[in-house]
Image (cartoon, coloured by chain):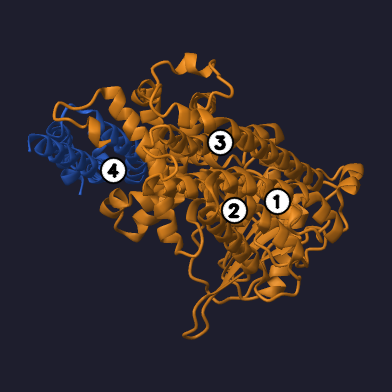
Chain colours: A orange, B blue
Amino acid sequence: MPHDQHAKGPGFRQSMSGLHTWTGLLLGWVLYAMFLTGTVSFFKDELSQWMRPELPRLTQPLDPAVVAQRVADEIGRIAPNASQWSIKLPDGRSNTVYAFWRTPGVGKGAPGFGQDYFDPITGHRAEARETLGGDFFYRFHFQFYYMSPFWGRLLAGLAAMSMLVAIVAGVITHKKIFTDFFTFRWGKGQRSWLDAHNALSVFGLPFHVMITYTGLVTLMALYVPWGERTAIKTPAERQQLTAELSAFIRADKPGGDKVPLGSIEAMVRQAQQRWGTTDVGRVNSANPGDATARVAVTRGDAGRVSMSPDYLEFDGVTAKLLKVHDHVGAAAETRGVLYALHIGRFSDLETRWLYFIVSFMGTAMVGTGLVMWTVKRRQKLPDPERPFFGFRLVERLNIASIAGLSIAMTAFLWANRLLPNAMADRAFWEIHVFFIVWGLTLLHALLRPAKSAWVEQLWTAAALLALIPVLNAATTQRPLWHSLASGDWVFAGIDLMCVALALLHAVLAIRTARNSARLRPPRSASKRGGIPAMSREAAT
Amino acid sequence: MTARAHRLRSIGALTSRIVAALFGGYGLAALCSVAALALPISKPQAVLTGQLASFAVCTAVVIWAFAARSALAVWIGLALVAAVLAPLAWSAS
């Protein structure tokens, strides 16, 4: 803030307040979108199930060993000359098995890549509509879309870094952080926004710090590659580093002797003896079908809070256990734990819900912070009818990035149900619909008076969300009453969650409409009085 | 005139702090990540330690850039830290 940057320097708290305001605002809209799509991603597997309604839910527990063998056999038929494949086993949260494989380039041809979802019961490819499912929100959350993942991830890193600074500066600003938490002044305009922002921030503070720092850690090799570039020079050193980060099997160059893979089932059985029946995460193979084949069976996410590599390495032909990889160095383990804390895959259902709720509060923290920027400045406007450009910009961007994002995300679910299954590029069109609708909400926010735009968009989001169970009932064989009766909690949960979110948006719409009616007369009346006291106060 | 000079000066100071926060923040974080290689641990662990710590360094620099009493103090502080880290980074590379 220029006015308090005198040569002597502003008060410490005041400059921290300024830092909090501006680091929070500049990428605040990006942060809000990252926070909300990230929050939803804690249930990405469930959302993916909901978005492929033709695939039945799993009703009986599966034996990972049997499933792994089935899918490995199927990949052997689909891609007999694959140089590598990887199978992610079902973990009770998904009803399909995801696998990918690489094929060597033939002659001068580029190496190939294939991926698909498989039915764990038959082992065949799962025949479902083309969709990215919950993975779209997940990927958008850290690399956005319509731009290269590289630039998207840099932008996400910049936003996360701003967030980390905003959190620290915000904590310094609040000397009465504990008292503030127990203070709530309802219906008091700016005070209420501030109190809401404080409560949301303070309650989740450890989580917000953790999720921001660990988010940066997930992509740290991209953000700070300098140590790696300085120290890691030879292929051997690179291998050492990679082995600390991921389940990495080094297979020799394929010898060309065709030998069928040994029993995958037997290898997974050995892993089960070590970790328990269900705690097997992935099965990877290098050079399958060759005499040099190697197989790695990776431990599941549920057994421990770490993403550091923990796997068994087998000779792919004889199924003999070659090596147990179950520990890494201290720094690598720290990274593994931080990484795991961010994505929360270790969570059981209760922990997952806690993650979702606190993360949702974090989203609301960013949202209330963005709105507060305008609420605070509105009272100081020289002419409330004609605010300055920056004010109008922030005000309109807030509408589209908060209310508009709710509409766009719900539109994505609508597109999933309404686009014809046979449509070309269907999965991409679901995403295009998301962005087209989001663009329209921005247009609407620019054209309508701000308060009306808020209210109309919040009501639109409420209506679209409330109608999701109706849409689902009309377009699938799995309506809400059926899901409830049969104990299909993934479908019932998402239908009911949409209704709960619809109620939230309706409440916000009603409150916004009421506020505007009540706030208008006093605002013009108090144009002169009462402002200095408010405006001098920073966020304390 | 003096008011204007004052204003220009404060804008200059603010710009200087912002530049220190952005480039100093990332610069020192990067420098720290390389200096970590001087730690008496294996190379992969040192690389990861530097990466893990870099975001805390970056945050601290940005806070410092706006907490120091004057813009000049900001740069002096950054220079001092850089002077400590640079030889370590240089010895490790």
Q: Nearer the viewer, residue B60 or A526?
A: A526
What is the spatial separation of the Cα atoms under label 3 and label 1, in whole angstroms? Answer: 21 Å
Q: Is residue A190 visible?
A: yes
Instruction: Check disc 2 and report the residue beneath it.
Output: A137
Instruction: Check disc 1 and report the residue beneath it.
Output: A47
Instruction: Check disc 4 and report the residue beneath it.
Output: B33
What is the spatial separation of the Cα atoms under label 4 and label 2, in whole angstroms? Answer: 31 Å
Pinpoint the chain carrying mark 4: B
Whether pointer 2 and pointer 3 mark residues with C-beta atoms closer than 8 Å, the reply is no
Q: Position of residue A478 (x, y in %)?
A: 86, 54
Say above or below: A432 vs A327.
below
> Quick check: do tags 4 and 1 share a chain?
no
Which residue ends up furthest to the bottom in the rendered image? A107
Tell us which disc is closer to us: 4 or 3.
3
Instruction: Check disc 3 and report the residue beneath it.
Output: A364
Q: Position of residue A39 (x, y in %)?
A: 59, 42
Neighbourhood count class around disc 3 (C-alpha, 10 Å): few under 14, some 14–19, many 20 upward: many
